[in-house]
Image (cartoon, rainbow, N blue to C red):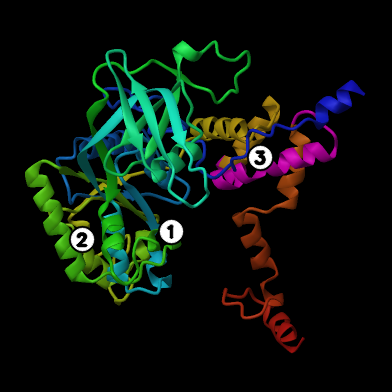
């Protein structure tokens, strides 16, 4: 019975979903931008990772804007993984906006407006302001309630102290309500913003740590503040230009940030914001943080979008643009002309091109090991060898898809570890592209509207299929 209970127990803390790139933690580079063999979820693609690391270093220094990078390579060679690694390496304060090329054609706003909004999402503004705050340990709170309800508002006194001084403050009705709402009591260390009246509870004073025998896990003890009670504190807010645009747009207001329905933002609003931000920069109140805009499947953009991007990259407030595509020489959308990657030559000339190479058998094995660990699957060595061979013969993505399927097949036969028989079973159940194409070629006469060239003797079969 004990074993049965053990197997039924579940880990309730791990609730995140495992995605295609959830194992990526960064680019896997050392301090000299040299790629490690296996690090932060990245395997292989050494030259591409090193080049991406140089771009990340440029972004972090914040001196270069308006540069564009193209990640080009065959499907399944890790282009999106490198972009995700760049996003993780850049840090939280630097904006990183992601979008797919086809998104522009499904939005209610115009293509150029959607691109402009994406550009401004990738440009951050770090705004500095000084606030006056009162910070100290609560010694006593006295609240005088009127004898007759409604006769007069509540009044009270708050005594705060630091290690050097102690002061009594008179309280109004709003401050009394705020203190009651935050359940502030004597012994708490609090900070009060003088401009807004906002109260922040910093924790309990160490001098009161022995007041109670038992404390909740959320109780935090802090030192009693030293120096003056009133202090000037510099607060830094990091927002994007797009967020400022939306807040100042009269038609939508700041609530559009939560709904996502920003609509078209007028050019006059953006001009005023750009002027104001320029003033703040001159006064030293704000600084621009150029981020990264990543557009996947860039061949889906049409000639109008490429023309707009050409002009937008010349702006001094442009972010670094990273685009990715898996196309070869193909038609530029919106024209009859062909071009490498489906991108016009004038725009290609602006791009630094990072090429990704197909993975070797050793790389595929390492990636599968990482994915097996990420998906929390126990697999035997023989099964891993077979899965690697499948990945080499078919595709890496197909091999990754088989991991969870094989784990479910193993679970059904009540096995503890995924074996070769489980891999073989799911390999027969789920076909890869090559086997599916071969099946279509064999039975093409039985499918409707088939455009593949027919072998001799298949004409009769096609007639029968159309009659049926």
Front-most of residues 326 and 223: 223
Distance, label 3 to label 1, CA atoms, is 37 Å
- Residue at the image point whose x is 68% and y is 54% from the top: 431
Compared across the picture, whether 213 is left or right of 228 comes to right
Segment colored magenta: 392-417
First along the sequence among labels 3 and 1: 1
**Image location (x, y in percent) of residue 227:** 25, 17
Q: Quadrant of the C terminus?
A: bottom right
- Residue at the image point whose x is 54% and y is 10% from the top: 210
Circle 1 residues within 10 Å: few <14, some 14–19, many ≥20: few
Q: Which mark lies nearer to you, 3 or 1?
A: 1
Residue 437 in sight in this render: yes
Residue furthest to the left:
282
Compared across the picture, whether 331 is left or right of 396 comes to left
Front-most of residues 131 and 66: 131
Point out which mark residue 258 bears.
1
**Image location (x, y in percent) of residue 139:** 41, 21
Residue 262: name its quadrant.
bottom left
Compared across the picture, whether 212 is left or right of 93 comes to right
Q: Which residue position is annotated with label 3?
A: 403
Q: Quadrant of the N terminus?
A: top right
């Amino acid at each position: 019975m004990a074993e049965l209970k053990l197997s039924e127990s579940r880990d309730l803390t791990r609730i995140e979903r495992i995605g295609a790139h959830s194992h990526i933690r960064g680019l896997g580079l050392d301090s000299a931008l040299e790629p490690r063999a296996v690090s932060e979820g990245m395997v292989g693609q050494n030259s591409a990772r090193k080049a991406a690391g140089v771009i990340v270093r440029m972004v972090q220094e914040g001196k270069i804007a308006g540069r564009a990078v193209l990640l080009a390579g065959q499907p399944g060679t890790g282009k999106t993984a490198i972009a995700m690694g760049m996003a993780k390496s850049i840090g939280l304060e630097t904006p990183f906006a992601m979008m797919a090329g086809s998104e522009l054609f499904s939005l209610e706003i115009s293509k150029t407006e959607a691109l402009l909004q994406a550009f401004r999402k990738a440009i951050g503004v770090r705004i500095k302001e000084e606030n006056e705050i009162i910070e100290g340990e609560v010694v006593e709170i006295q609240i005088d309630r009127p004898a007759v309800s409604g006769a007069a508002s509540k009044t009270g006194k708050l005594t705060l102290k630091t290690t050097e001084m102690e002061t009594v403050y008179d309280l109004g009705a709003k401050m009394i309500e705020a203190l009651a709402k935050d359940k502030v009591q004597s012994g708490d260390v609090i900070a009060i913003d003088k401009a807004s009246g906002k109260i922040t509870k910093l924790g309990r004073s160490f001098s009161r740590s022995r007041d109670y025998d038992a404390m909740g896990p959320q109780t935090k003890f802090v030192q009693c503040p030293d120096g003056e009670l009133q202090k000037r504190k510099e607060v830094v807010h990091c927002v994007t230009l797009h967020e400022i645009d939306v807040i100042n747009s009269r038609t939508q207001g700041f609530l559009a940030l939560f709904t996502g329905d920003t609509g078209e933002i007028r050019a006059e609003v953006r001009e005023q914001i750009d002027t104001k931000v320029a003033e703040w920069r001159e006064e030293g109140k704000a600084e621009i943080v150029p981020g990264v805009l990543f557009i996947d499947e860039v061949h889906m953009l049409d000639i109008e979008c490429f023309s707009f991007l050409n002009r937008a990259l010349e702006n001094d407030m442009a972010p670094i643009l990273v685009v990715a595509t898996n196309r070869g020489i193909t038609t530029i959308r919106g024209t009859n002309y062909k071009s490498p990657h489906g991108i016009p030559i004038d725009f290609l000339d602006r791009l630094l091109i990072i090429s990704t190479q197909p993975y070797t058998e050793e790389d595929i094995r390492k990636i599968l090991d990482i994915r097996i660990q990420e998906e929390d699957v126990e697999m035997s060595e023989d099964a891993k060898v077979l899965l690697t061979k499948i990945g080499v013969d078919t595709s890496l993505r197909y091999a990754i898809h088989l991991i969870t399927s094989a784990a479910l097949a193993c679970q059904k036969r009540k096995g503890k570890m995924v074996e070769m028989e489980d891999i073989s079973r799911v390999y027969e159940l789920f076909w890869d592209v090559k086997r599916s194409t071969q099946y279509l070629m064999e039975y093409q006469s039985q499918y409707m509207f088939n455009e593949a060239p027919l072998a001799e003797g298949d004409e009769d079969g096609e007639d029968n299929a159309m009659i049926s």
